[in-house]
Image (cartoon, rainbow, N blue to C red):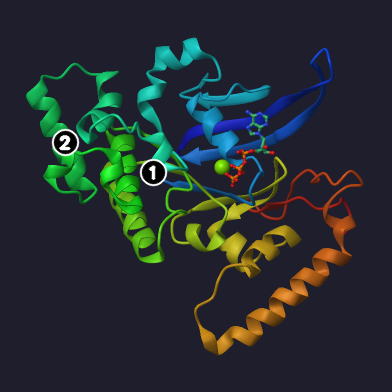
């Protein structure tokens, strides 16, 4: 295995202010002590319900969110500091596809400028060279040439998301943080965009941090997966660990929530969902401490870790 990015004991706490003096009275523990490694050419999945802290981790990795504590190591250096990021050309190597393509693409800019913008920060190209490069990027994501001079609102959600992908690969990055890249899309278009992402991964040896709330979507994309709940990891493992041998009740719950198309087994899935829900209601104490906080992870195998009460469950 060859490591690209290492996250150690990462914490991001947002202050809550209140009262007349606007004092800090409490904190939102958006991310509260997570560790993981993204390997070269591989996809790491980050899965959890809304508000669990997924986007916050993604934004911290690309330098858009200040960390409270912990380390993010790239090429042996801690990139939580802006000066280090600049020195390593980190902002060229690590790009993000944002959760909402409508608001993340500047509506006043034509596609040629939207896609060329990250290139301009790092390379000086002639107009001609730049256009050629953008055309090639549009081609990679399966968009026609005439998209060049249109504006973001002139495209469908799926097309906009592909433009977001083209923009993210424009600087030839090593890692792309893909925050719910297909959640807003129809199933058929989802598959299209995911296929593009896989193709360019193979072509360029890219790594992804793939963020989703849906274990069904990440299944065919991820090599390793972390299941997140309230700022903590409840379970981490290989794809097989998570899908075939889930241990934490929260993981089981997410798995039972994956929509099924096979009508034949519908009753079986309903039964399973009811069983998991019952276990969830009855055995909270085995999975969360008295403050509702997720326990520390412990190892089941070299690849598989789960957050269970010591000696229990
Ligand atoms: N700037 C901020 N100030 C205060 N709290 C914030 C801020 N940004 C996020 N939060 C809180 O941090 C928590 C994690 O938010 P985050 O956006 O990372 O969740 P998420 O897992 O990406 O959810 P979703 O699936 O809905 O996108 C939430 O409780 C959110 O309300
Ligand atoms: Mg989010």
Tally the marks: 2
Work out how far the residue at label 2 is from the one at label 1, CA to CA, in angstroms.
Answer: 33 Å
Residue at left 36%, top 62%? 191
Residue 230 screen position, x and y as percent: 72, 44
At label 2, counting other C-alpha atoms closer than 10 Å, the crowd grade (few under 14, some 14-19, many 20 or more) is few
Please state if 106 lies on the left or on the right of 25 as rendered. left
What label does residue 149 carry, if any?
2
SS type, badge 2? helix
Please state if 294 lies on the left or on the right of 235 as rendered. right
Residue 10 screen position, x and y as percent: 66, 30
Residue at left 54%, top 14%? 81
Q: Is residue 68 above or below residue 257?
A: above
Residue 25 screen position, x and y as percent: 84, 22
Which image quarter is the C terminus in?
A: bottom right
What label does residue 41 carry, if any?
1
At label 1, counting other C-alpha atoms closer than 10 Å, the crowd grade (few under 14, some 14-19, many 20 or more) is many
Is there any visible trace of residue 229 in the rendered image?
A: yes
Q: Which quadrant of the structure image shows residue 189?
A: bottom left
Q: Ligand 2: does it lie within 8 Å of the C-beta at label 1?
A: no
Q: Which quadrant of the structure image shows residue 122?
A: top left
Where ligand 2 lies, by image quadrant?
A: top right
Viewer-proximal residue, 44 or 104? 104
Q: Residue furthest left?
A: 128
Q: Is residue 197 above or below residue 124?
A: below
Q: Residue furthest front?
A: 20
Please state if 46 lies on the left or on the right of 29 as rendered. left
Q: Residue furthest right?
A: 290
Viewer-proximal residue, 68 or 25? 25
């Amino acid at each position: 295995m060859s490591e690209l990015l290492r996250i150690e004991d990462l914490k991001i706490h947002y202050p809550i202010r209140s009262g007349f003096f606007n004092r800090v009275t409490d904190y939102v523990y958006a991310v509260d002590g997570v560790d993981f490694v993204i390997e070269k050419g591989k996809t790491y999945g980050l899965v959890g319900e809304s508000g669990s802290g997924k986007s916050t981790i993604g934004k911290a990795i690309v330098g858009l969110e200040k960390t409270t504590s912990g380390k993010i190591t790239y090429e042996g250096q801690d990139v939580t500091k802006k000066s280090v990021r600049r020195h390593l050309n980190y902002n060229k190597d690590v790009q993000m596809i944002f959760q909402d393509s409508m608001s993340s693409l500047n509506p006043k800019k034509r596609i040629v400028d939207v896609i060329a913008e990250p290139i301009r920060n790092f390379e000086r190209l002639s107009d001609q060279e730049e256009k050629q490069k953008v055309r090639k990027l549009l081609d990679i994501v399966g968009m026609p040439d005439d998209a060049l001079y249109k504006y973001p609102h002139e495209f469908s959600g799926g097309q906009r998301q592909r433009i977001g992908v083209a923009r993210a690969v424009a600087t030839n990055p090593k890692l792309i943080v893909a925050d719910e890249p297909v959640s807003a899309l129809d199933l058929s278009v989802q598959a299209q965009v995911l296929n593009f992402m896989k193709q360019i991964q193979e072509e360029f040896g890219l790594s992804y941090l793939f963020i989703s709330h849906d274990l069904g979507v990440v299944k065919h994309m991820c090599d390793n997966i972390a299941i997140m709940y309230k700022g903590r990891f409840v379970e981490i493992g290989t794809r097989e660990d998570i899908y075939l041998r889930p241990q934490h009740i929260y993981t089981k719950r997410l798995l039972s929530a994956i929509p099924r198309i096979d009508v034949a087994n519908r009753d079986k899935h309903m039964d399973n969902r009811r069983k998991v829900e019952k276990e969830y209601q009855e055995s909270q104490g085995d999975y969360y401490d008295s403050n509702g906080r997720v326990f520390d992870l412990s190892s089941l195998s070299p690849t598989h870790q789960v957050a269970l009460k010591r000696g229990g469950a």
